[in-house]
Amino acid sequence: MSSENFNFKPLEEFVNRWVHKFIPETLHEDNIEFPQQKNKNYFLIFLKILPWVTLLIFIFTVFYDPFSSWSIKFPWREETLSLQGVLRMLAVTGLVGYGTNYIAIKMLFHPREKRPLLGQGLIPASKIKIAYRLGEAISREIINPQLIVKQIKDTGLVLKYMDRFNHSLKETLELPEFQKDLMEVIEHYINAILRSNEFRQSIKNFLQGIDFENLKGIEAGLLKIYRLLGGDKEIAQRIEEIILSIEYKIDPHEEIIQDYLHKLPHLIDENKSTIEDILLKIIIFLVERINVKKVIINNLLEFDELRLENLILYSTSDQLDYIQYLGCLLGILGGLFIWIPYESFVLSILLGGIIFGLDEVLYRMRKK
């Protein structure tokens, strides 16, 4: 029977009414949540405040230098160092450090469209290359049939869902409403098939192939009497009309059908491994037919520059903030190198050694 003449509405209504019963609940234990930072990062807060403090100091020192008459004497130096202008110099180098990092990060994304003099941001300009590299890497390393099948087998995902499905199936099959709806759907479509043009034509072709004229014996006598009573109508046409007038009733077969349905969960339990293999082969077949690389590339290429920027910023916001605001602190340290290069060099080595040494100790303690 052709799909054009087939009425899917009863089946659609049946599926919509009962499909939620057969779909097992999500296995929440395998869900992965995005890690949220629980504690405030006070160092990052300090770095964000530092450029504003540095700017205020710079504005203040433009009009007044509180250390203009001050000087400092180091024991290892013969000359006395004046502190005049040092505060302003450190403020300027801090602002320059922050400003250069800020501009560098903005240049990753801006300008979004190519400009005659300013050019285009690194990521918008490399959008096609990024899309192709990501698509190739993901399709090779993350989404491929071997890794998907391995993940499904390692987690026992098919067997878990099969158990949930079987449990839902057993409960649903016991519901009188489900049994009634199922029998009505089966009865409806059997009658639809009996009344279809394709079924009529197949019956007609079958009956036309029977040689009524060459029948012998008592059957031949009965058919002659039947043709005599039937007038000019052919025997095949009479039989066709009788068959097509039949209306199928499922009531006598309900117990048999229900018996088979109640055996279904038990059959699924007995053939779990076979069903799992079949489902895995279907998954492999579908994944191999999907060009994952092409799908990823096309989706990334459809991202406009603003959406791509928001995606990257959402994923790396804290790290980019560190880079941006750390520039101010590094600029201030750079100003110290300009003022007292030898002392700053020794102090940086000393502080660097203390920080890296303490970090290594804490890392090993946490690892244990």
Image (cartoon, helix red, strand yellow):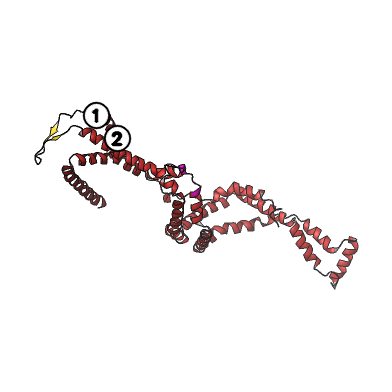
Q: In which quarter of the image is the N terminus?
A: bottom right
Instruction: State the residue position of label 2.
Output: 51
Q: Nearer the viewer, residue 303 or 356?
A: 303
Q: Can residue 314 be seen in this view?
A: no
Q: How far apart are marks 1 and 2 (CA)?
A: 15 Å
- Answer with mark 1 or mark 2, whichever residue precedes in sequence: 2
Q: Position of residue 347 (x, y in %)?
A: 17, 44
In the picture, measured across the screen, residue 364 lies left or right of residue 282, that is left
**Res 246 quadrant in image:** bottom right
How many marks the image carries: the answer is 2
Q: How crowded is mark 1: few (under 14 residues within 10 Å), some or many (20 or more)?
A: some
Residue 38 badge:
none
Residue depth check, mark 1 versus mark 2: number of the one nearer the observer: 1
Amino acid on which disc 1 is placed: Thr
Q: Position of residue 65 (x, y in %)?
A: 21, 28
For this orientation, the residue located farthest to the front is 117
Q: Does the segment drawn in magenta span residue 2?
A: no
Amino acid on which disc 2 is placed: Pro
What are the residue bounds of the magenta stretch? 301-306
In the picture, measured across the screen, residue 38 lies left or right of residue 143, that is left
Residue at left offset 34%, top offset 40%: 102
Q: Position of residue 124 (x, y in %)?
A: 44, 46
Q: Position of residue 128 (x, y in %)?
A: 47, 51
Instruction: State the residue position of label 1.
Output: 61
Residue at left offset 42%, top offset 50%: 29
Of helix, strand and loop, which one carries label 1? helix
Residue at left offset 42%, top offset 47%: 123
For this orientation, the residue located farthest to the top is 63
